[in-house]
Structure formats: structure tokens, C-alpha cells
Amino acid sequence: MPRHAPGDPEVVQDLLQHPLNRRTLIGGSTVMLGAGLLAGLAHRPSSASAAPFAQQKGGTLVVAFDADPEVLDPHITTALLASRVLALMHDNLITRDYDGSFKPELAEKWEVSPDGKVYTFTLKQGVKFHSGKDFTSADVKYTFERWLSIETSPTSYNIEPIETIETPDPQTVRFLLKQPYNIFLDQLAGSWAVMVNQQAVEQAGQDYGVTAVDGTGPYKFVSWTRNQNIQLARNDAYTWGSPIFQNKGPAHLDGIEIRVVPEDTTRIAEFQAGNIHIVQDVPAVDVERLKQGPGVSIVEYQQLQTTYLGMNVTKPPVDDVKVRQAISYALNKEEIVQGANFGLGQPARTILHPDTPYYWEGADAVAPTYNPDQAATLLEEAGWTPGGDGIRAKNGQPLVLPLWIINDSTTVLQAQIIEQQLAQVGIKVETKQYEQTAWFEAARSGEQVGYIIGVFFETADILYFYFKTEQQPAPNRFFYSVPEVDQWLEDSRTNPDPEQVAQDYQNVQERLIQDAPAAPLIHTLGTLGTAETAEGVQVHPSRWLYRMLDISLK
């Protein structure tokens, strides 16, 4: 689902540094920064007011990604880059405003029954798919039933509480749930709950999301040349944008080109040359230099994100909890933040960012901090003794941690520092680099032992996403399975008592620190590069540049 921040590209669906309604003018471009993190963080202002400039029509915005999306079918991916492209071509029933509140999108209003088990949505009229087909309640029903029917979907668990979907008329859709579900609206506003057209899906078959996409969003799919670019064109019929945007449609831009430029140096050179308007996730090593250069701006923003070292608890040597704990104690996270991320982030104590609702404050006191002596003690207790070459061994076998990583520059630096740190306590790291899409494919095998990846999220339900037993083999690539944790995670979704939900999440976080299936590394600071010719660029707290309705070129 997937980011990405350096380290991964997974999303479960940004504490931005500037208060909302404040514009930061950098290098001549207008960069609008949303405020707050998300629902649960109170006292945040609402979305930004109208921009002071007259936005012009026309032009193709060129956006540089460091890798291709995995696929553009919302029901079979968790990759962050896919979510960013899908958001341009689709709409949800409801959406999140910049202050984290829910607002209408394809639904103009909704009601929830007193028992929390029936959600009724009234749909906007006049909405059409890119193919020209009218959007009705039947499309909502099809979208969610298809999603539930895909056995290999990594995200369908999010809507499993749906029992039936009723469509009493073309503009009304009713969800009947098996039980109250605390985060149902969160799921409906999420990256994967976008509307799809049954006819287009069935006509394209296995190629849907590769050669064909049919949404209701502000931009239409034109073409996708793998590892080169994705071409999108403005949907001239689009007039039903959410009230969270200044422009309700059509978009100001003629189109968008998502250009895939894997090499950091090439991507940044093209950006500086004026051939690229927006660069997502500017490499940390380039940020300070680009801030001083002409014609471009660098926006830094906080986000609910965590990069971590994951461990498959069924694979030696990390099938031993003491080895996993030792790895956590051997990691100097501040050194990683400074050496690999050039200070653009903060050391992580748990998978949850401290600003996440239901973050357990007690974690700071009990989570492992850098202590190589404690790491050595744990390895001794696990039977791993020092060898002549500095690498520990047991029963004649060296202590080796295979580490799979995505080959972006920041993650490579993180891995190099981790190799040095773990070597100091007698663990040899063998790193294997993958292109992003290849990493996801390899990780589905379940053969990974150690790996570095990151994730964006909105709520503490990220813990369900990663650590529930049924989430194996992905995204539970840890192969972590603890009945008590499963029970707490289930209860956190359905219990109407917020205090008990808080206790559930505390229990889970405490147990994860104890069992150590992951060593959280860093909460990265988001970076965005924009050319001075791009105006109306607004970073959404959880959706990056979202629908790109307000962006124009001057």
C-alpha cells in the first residue's frame, strides 16, 4: 500500500508543518500546505481558502516517479504509487478533507442507523464514467462485491463486515453490516474504495488496470508504457468534484504524464532542467542543494509514515525472539536518520507514529533503544557465540541476516548503515536489492527473512493490516500469528467503547515490542519538488496531491 517514503511503497492509507490557510511562496511557485494529521487530532483548521492567483487552463503536467506502479486495479494492490495514480482517475463515495473530516464526493449525503449497522448513501446525479456510462447505485454494489470476491485481494478484509448491499433506486445505496464497524467511513474514503465500471472490468478481463481503466475521476486513462510513462487526459465532463477542492472541475490541466525515472541523478537533473514539474519523494541527499537552486521549490512535510526492518518470524535466525530483540537493540536509529535520511525524519519507537490516534505513550519507556551490550547479551543467551572473524556462530553456522531492500538511494544507505551496526554485535547482513515492483513480487513468496520497507497510514488500524494472522503472506510478511493479538485487533474494530479500543491498541503495541517482528527505524519527513511554473500545488494530509484539480501551469 506502500509510500512511499524511502524504504517502501505501501499505503494503508501529513502533519504538515504549516497551518492551513497559510501559503508558502517558494521560488515563485505557490505551494499550499494542508494542516493536521487526520481524524482524531482535534483543533485543526479546515481546508485552504481560494488561491490569490488566476489559474490558467492548459498544458501537460509532468510528474516524476522513481518506479512504475504495480497495477492500476484498486482491488489487487497496496502500492503507494498505484494509489497516487488511481486517485487521479477515480472518485470515492466520500473523501477526507484536509482537516481529516469526512466530506461528500460521489455521495451527496449519508446516514448511519442508531445501531451503527446500516449506512445509507444518496448519490449525486449526472455523474458518468469516462466511457460515458451513467454512474448509479448498481456500480457501487458491483464495486464492493467484486472487491470482496477477489480471494487474493490484499485489502478486501477492510470491508468484510459488509453483509449485504441494497440498491432501492439508482441514486440510493445501502450497506448492511454484520456488526458495528468503527472505521467503516475510513474504509469508504480510502485509496482502494474507488468506483469501477463492471462493463469495463469484464471487457478487459485480466488486463484491467494495465491496458484499460474506467473511473469517474478528473483525468482519463490514455496509455501506459511500462517503465516509461502513464498518460492521462482531462475529463472534460467532470463537474462533480468534492467541496474540499476549490475547483470542482473540469481540471485546469489538459493532462498529466507520470514519467518513470528510476535513477535519482537523472530524475533530479531533468527536474532542474525544467523537463519535470513535480518530483515525488526528493532523495534526501539532494534536498539542501535543491533548496538553494533557482526555479524550483522543495516542500518538507510531516506524515503518518514509518520505515522499518521487518523479520519473518518463521525463518532462521530470526525465528528466535532473542535474535529479533537483539537486532532492535543493535540499531542506532539516530545514526540512520542522519546518515541515510540527512536528518529528514525522527527515530521510530513503534510502527505507529506518535501523532497517530491510539498511539500508546508508554511505548517510549519500554521500546528498545540503542544498546549494543544488551544486544550482545541476548545473542549469547540465544546460543550465538563470537567467531574469529567477528561474526557469531552456533552449531558451526554463521549468524547471517538476509536483507531484501528496494533499490532507491535512501534505502540503500539505510541498509549500508544497518550492515555496519549489526556487524558490531556479530551479525552479518547479506543485502539483496530489487526494483520496487520486483520487490513486491519476491516478497509474495514468503521466502524473505529480513527486509526494509515503509508504510503510510491514517489510523492505528495499520496494526490490523500488518499483524493479523489472516493477513499472511502479505501484507503480514512477518508471518506473525498470536491469538491474543488477533482478538485485540478484532475488538478494536467493533467495540463501541473508545476506552476499550484504546486498551486493545495498547495491548497490541506492548506485545509487538515484546515479540519484535519488526524493528521500527524512522518516521520520514515527506519531500516534494515543484517547478516554479506549477501553481496551486497542495499537499493533502493523507493523499499526497490527491485529485490534482487545483493545479495549473503558468
Image (cartoon, rainbow, N blue to C red):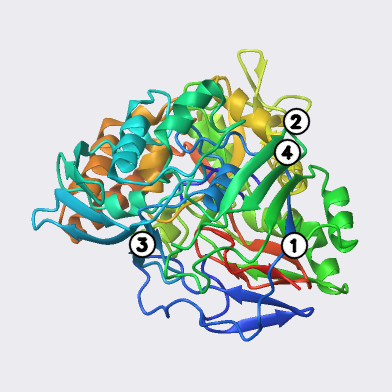
The nearer-to-camera label among 2 and 4 is 4
Establish if 160 lies above or below 525: above
Q: Name the residue under label 1.
A: 59
Res 30 → quadrant: bottom right
Q: Which of marks 3 and 4 is nearer the N terminus?
A: 3
Q: Residue 111 carries which label?
A: none
| Front-most of residues 470 and 481 | 470
Q: Earlier in the sequence, mark 2 or mark 4?
A: 2
The nearer-to-camera label among 3 and 2 is 3
Q: Position of residue 94 (x, y in %)?
A: 36, 57
Q: Earlier in the sequence, mark 2 or mark 1?
A: 1
Q: Position of residue 355 (x, y in %)?
A: 44, 65
Q: Which of marks 3 and 2 is nearer the N terminus?
A: 3
Kind of element beneath mark 2? loop
Pointers 3 and 4 in contact (C-beta within 8 Å): no
Residue type at tag 4: Glu
